[in-house]
Image (cartoon, rainbow, N blue to C red):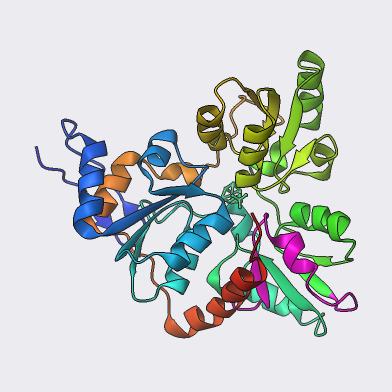
Amino acid sequence: MPDTAVLDPEIGYVEEDVDPTLDLFSEIERLKDEKNAILLAHYYQESEIQDLADYVGDSLGLARKAAATDAEIIVFAGVHFMAESAKIMNPEKRVILPDLNAGCSLADTCPADEFAEWLKQYPDHKVVTYVNSTAAVKALSDVTCTSSSAAHIINQFPEDQPLIFAPDKNLGKYLIKETGRDMVLWDGVCIVHETFSEKRILRLQVRHPDAEVLAHPECRDAVLQHADFIGSTSQIRRYARENGPASFIVATEEGILHQMRQDEPQNELIPAPPESGCNCSQCPHMRLNTVEKLYLCLRHEQPEVTLEEDLRRRALEPIERMLEMSEGVK
Ligand code: 13P
Ligand code: SF4
């Protein structure tokens, strides 16, 4: 039975009628080889996609891999801004994303036109922008950063240099504490990290008194103040690997647990709960990618991420500066 998937260039695959008898795992591996494609996946992807990936990492690791690859096609199993950054660094390569609608609530809080207008109030400030932003916002910035590299990058600016940090205010507040720099913050948040519940984490700690809390710095300050360790996804993973076997309450998107379970099966991993509803904390954008869409996108080499050349060049500079300034960051 042939697959009849139809790709709408605006919205991605609208019909995922993939032949159910196909072994999608071996098909995806075959297509990767045949097309000289590399599959890069973020930790917030579903487990099966992580298992198929050539590299699974945090935003910095993924950007480094994208910058270094000699594959002809980059398949980005993550969200749009990640694939867009890969394209900015690799204009000659085809960069494809299983679902073009996989956006980011945080990037959406910072429209480039509003950001440009707002920046006019701070002509003397340098702009440090989290990679969770559009190319147009990156193009208005001096340097981009990831959660693992932000403090390291900020500390390289002279102390008397006023700074703006955008778009995540939770990460910004955390960085002000970490670096002692009084930065001006854009008012954006991530819908996943914003909703972890301090109250429910405290209740979990009563039930698991020995558990350490590991939190992503996109969480609110009320959650971060109970954390034993704060770091990017890769740093959280490494901390649990190096400090187990033990119990950990993990305050980030639950996709990270897949690699953490494999690293140290004896660790007890307890996902931190959101304010209300179920106990799962999945990013609705990341989870738009599925194994079926991954197969279709590899097979048809679409949907492709493209951007206008002038914008690409302007967005490239702050990304390259980030890669230089984050040398040595793990
Ligand atoms: P890191 O993987 O760099 O910690 O980023 C987390 C995130 O929210 C990506 O969208
Ligand atoms: Fe954006 Fe938050 Fe999803 Fe990351 S987890 S992609 S920051 S919405």
Image location of residue 23, percent across then percent down = 20, 34
**In this rendering, would 287 be left or right of 214?**
left
Q: Is residue 111 above or below residue 260?
A: below
Q: Which residues are magenta?
A: 137-162
**In this rendering, would 67 be left or right of 38?**
right
Q: Is residue 133 above or below residue 195?
A: below
Residue 153 lies within the magenta run: yes
Q: Quadrant of residue 16?
A: top left
**In this rendering, would 119 be left or right of 284?**
right
Q: Is residue 214 above or below residue 147?
A: above
Q: Nearer the viewer, residue 118 or 273?
A: 273
Q: Nearer the viewer, residue 9 or 43?
A: 43
Image location of residue 308, percent across then percent down = 43, 80
The residue that appears at 80% across and 67% down in the rendered structure is 155
The residue that appears at 64% across and 69% down in the rendered structure is 144
- The quarter of the image holding the N terminus is top left
Residue 216 lies within the magenta run: no
- The quarter of the image holding the C terminus is bottom right
Q: Could you tell me what secondary structure mostly forms the magenta stretch? A: loop
Image location of residue 227, percent across then percent down = 80, 36
